Structure formats: structure tokens, C-alpha cells
Image: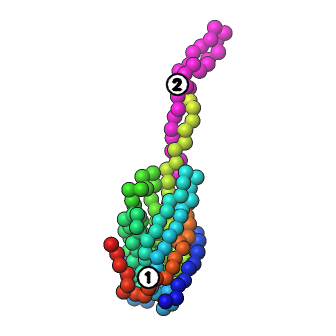
Amino acid sequence: MARLALTVWAGALLLAGCSPGPPGLPVPSAKDVGVYDFTTSIPFRTGAITLAGTFEITRDTVLLVVDNAYCRELLPGSMASFTYRCEGASFIDVSWIHVNFDRRQPLLYCGASAERRIPVEREVCSQYMVTNDGRRVCIRWRIETTYRTERQSAGLLATKRGYPGTFQST
């Protein structure tokens, strides 16, 4: 059994779906049809989000099972791509994770993107006092936490492990 390993980097995320579309849609080449194991690590300053699982490319869809998340399709019937939105207990500070596959070349253009809430702490004055000479000075400080949003993406490292019909979801 031939093994194929590709590192692919995803650029822009297309919001699309993973349902068979109308006749005449672009289809992957016969050599891409099969079952693949994959891993990816989406880098963030606060630590990477790691995904691993299996996907199957058929002539009209991509089936996806992620080991540490539940994934569902977005916008079924897209002309361009298949996109899944994934959620999991280990992604508490993550707003969303998308795994995307191009409809024509699912191995060449596949990747994962995520949005994470990053806490930002700063010291702010909580109590002021006016001095004898009329200046206003801080006499008590506190830590204030706000959040900013960070988006990152990464490619999938995929290895072919079988042919259509050998996909096992748990």
C-alpha cells in the first residue's frame, strides 16, 4: 500500500460545506480518493491547538472524524469546498475551529483555522487621592483583564491509509 505524506498550508478559509452538490460539480482526481489519517497544529502565542483524525475523500464529498472534537458541516452544497466547524471540551477559550478541503484538489488545498480569545492583563488605578499641592495620584492599583481575538491557520499533514469504504468512524 503506497503511503503519501503531504504538508499543505491553507491560506484563506472558504465558508462552504460538505454535502454532495448538484451534478457537474468539480470532483477530485481518482488518485486522491481514499482514506487519510491527519494531524495539524494551529500555532498561538498561548499554545498550539492540536487536531488529529481521519478523513475520506470520495468522488462527491469529504467525510471527517476528529479525535478530540465534534465536527459538523457548514453551508452544505458549496461549489468550491467542504468546510467543517469543530468544537471540543479541550477548546474552552477557542471561538471556532474550521477544517477546510478544496472540492477539486482536497489534498493540495486543505487546512485548519481557529479563532482564540487571548486574555490581556493590565494594571489600572482603582483609587485616587489629591495631594496637598493639588496633584491627583493613584493610591491603589488593580489588575484588569480584557480579551483580544487572535486568528491562525495551518496545513494538514495527511497520510493515505486506505481506499474508499475502509473509513471507520467511532
Residue 55 lies, in percent from the top left, at 43, 77
For the residues labelled 2 and 1, the Cα–Cα distance comes to 58 Å
x and y percentages locating residue 60 in the rendered image:
41, 85
Identify the disc placed on residue 126. Answer: 2
The residue furthest right is 133
Q: Residues within 10 Å of mark 1 (few under 14, many from 20)?
A: many
Give the residue pinned by disc 1.
35
Quadrant location, the C terminus: bottom left
Callout 2 amino acid: Ser
Name the residue rendered at 39%, 72% in the picture: 65
Query: Where is residue 42 shown, x and y percent of the image?
Result: 54, 62
Q: Residue furthest front?
A: 1
Crowd tier of the residue under label 2, counting other residues whose Cα lies within 10 Å: few below 14, some 14–19, many 20 or above: few
Q: Is residue 145 magenta?
A: yes
Q: Which residues are magenta?
A: 125-149
Above or below residue 131? Residue 17 is: below
Q: Residue at x 40, y 63 (%)?
A: 68
Q: Secondary structure at mark 1?
A: strand
Number of on-image labels: 2
